[in-house]
Image (cartoon, grey):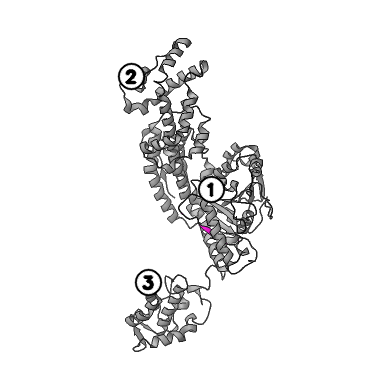
Amino acid sequence: MFSWMGRQAGGRERAGGADAVQTVTGGLRSLYLRKVLPLEEAYRFHEFHSPALEDADFENKPMILLVGQYSTGKTTFIRYLLEQDFPGMRIGPEPTTDSFIAVMYGETEGSTPGNALVVDPKKPFRKLSRFGNAFLNRFMCSQLPNQVLKSISIIDSPGILSGEKQRISRGYDFCQVLQWFAERVDRIILLFDAHKLDISDEFSEAIKAFRGQDDKIRVVLNKADQVDTQQLMRVYGALMWSLGKVINTPEVLRVYIGSFWAQPLQNTDNRRLFEAEAQDLFRDIQSLPQKAAVRKLNDLIKRARLAKDTVHLEFQLFNNLLSMWPTHRTEMRQAEADAGPLPQPAAGPEDAMSFLGPNSIGLGRSFRPVCASRIYNVHAYIISYLKKEMPNVFGKENKKRELISRLPEIYIQLQREYQISAGDFPEVKAMQEQLENYDFTKFHSLKPKLIEAVDNMLSNKIASLMSLISQEEMSMPTQLVQGGAFDGTTEGPFNQGYGEGAKEGADDEEWVVAKDKPVYDELFYTLSPINGKISGVNAKKEMVTSKLPNSVLGKIWKLADCDCDGMLDEEEFALAKHLIKIKLDGYELPHSLPPHLVPPSHRKSLPKAD
């Protein structure tokens, strides 16, 4: 195992020797608690964006979130992967799943209702309590002893309908719940039915809630066996067109086409395509345990960057309020005369520093961020006093509305001043709506030490942790999702590609090339063999007619020249032509020659393949 030395060299931190953790996950937790969490708490990150992370968020298994309109096969997809029913499962053509169901591993089969689930510290769902009883009554956890669930957990979501009634009748913010899950899961799978490609208003809003999580999204076009090949081409094109209107990314989303249930295919014309797509999807899901640490690290970096941007935004808003000081100087003096003696108001930022005390005189503008906290305390005190006595003196609400309306301009100003990417900022409209509920004068001033701690984490600690992740992956056995549908195609004749390409003839007693050898022999004797062999020059004349690139033909030559004498006999030439046919049929060449492809006359002399 590896150690993550999380403390800096400072005396107070160095004294605590218990800070060395034994896993990458422990290192992530340590970084978050010591570097990121203080910044989040100081600047109300949890109120604006996302609740604080807990131990369960670092320890939980990889999670998959399934989202789609009703009757697209979400619950059936889970049943297909697990190969068994789970508590709370209902399948039908009508909208059946009306709850969020977390399907997780448990030694005994059972279910836990939402209200009990959000108080369990071992589950990563405690922060869902903020969505209220309307949601918790529609949330449950199904636990069962299933091999697949030892590696991953699956979140089933309610089917999405169209129309305003469905959106209102839920009783909770459906898109906010999806966004909460999206920030914590490892994969988001959007399911579509080949006969239901329309994206309703609510489904569109749900997809938009995944903004910033584009790398997690995969699309499944389910029930594709219910249409023929020509219709499938049109369905695929229509789906990509619909997705292009709601997902604003230049990259094309990966779409897996198939029929994900354990029933006979209604149309077998595309069976080979469905099998290849299913294997690609299975490999993507199976790799999640291996990539879990990297995903958590990536999410922590995104969270830290967003927290920094929130700090700069709050500080900018505070500075804008501070600029009101000269404008209202006359009103403040009148208010002081009416309300009683108060400290003499300042004419500007430098005067404000001198107003704080003799030790602050002459600090100048360059130290304004350091002293802003002291300026803020006095300024907030004056404003709170005047608000109590004369609430309309400052025109505070007008200024607040002005700043909120100018939020896009403030974003641009912060981007230029702090060299922040535009993509790191929260969505303007959502941020404007949230700011309506806050008193800007209560925002904290800039705390450089908190910013420096996060910058140091991003520039130094993360790089060290990335190297530890690589070392840990190399030292530990490969972790893949096993059990259920994942075991059905890993071994035996139903494994993908079994009996195809270079694997063709693996179970046959006869050499697989022999069936086409008479045709290859005719070509061989037209190439002027000498003592039963043709030279490399003559072989090349025939092989280049395949129009394959030299890099591929060179590999074929290396595989076919079994005795490495720089010439080909008739069996070796037949093997070369067979390998060319394999490549032209769209299959990959083997790295080394499999035993069943070795020409019969060379099998004793050829070293055994690895």
The x, y position of residue 561, in whole percent, is 37, 79
Magenta-colored span:
250-259
Is 343 located above or below residue 525 in the figure?
A: above
Label 1 belongs to which residue? 185
Q: Residue at x 45, y 43 (%)?
A: 302
Quarter of the view holding residue 326: top left
| Mark-to-mark CA distance, 3 and 2 | 78 Å
Tell me the amino acid under the disc marked 2: Asn
| Mark-to-mark CA distance, 3 and 1 | 43 Å
| Mark-to-mark CA distance, 2 and 1 | 52 Å
Tell me the amino acid under the disc marked 3: Pro
Label 3 belongs to which residue? 549
Label 2 belongs to which residue? 359
Q: Residue at x 39, y 73 (%)?
A: 548
By secondary structure, the bulk of the magenta-drawn segment is best described as: loop
Q: Nearer the viewer, residue 472 or 448?
A: 448
**The residue tagged with tag 1: helix, strand or loop?**
loop
Is 210 located above or below residue 580 in the figure?
A: above
Residue mark closest to the camera, 3 vs 1: 3
Marked residue nearer the N-terminal end (3 or 2)? 2
- Asked whether disc 3 touches disc 1, contact meaning CB atoms under 8 Å apart, the reply is no
The x, y position of residue 352, in whole percent, is 37, 20
Tell me the amino acid under the disc marked 1: Val
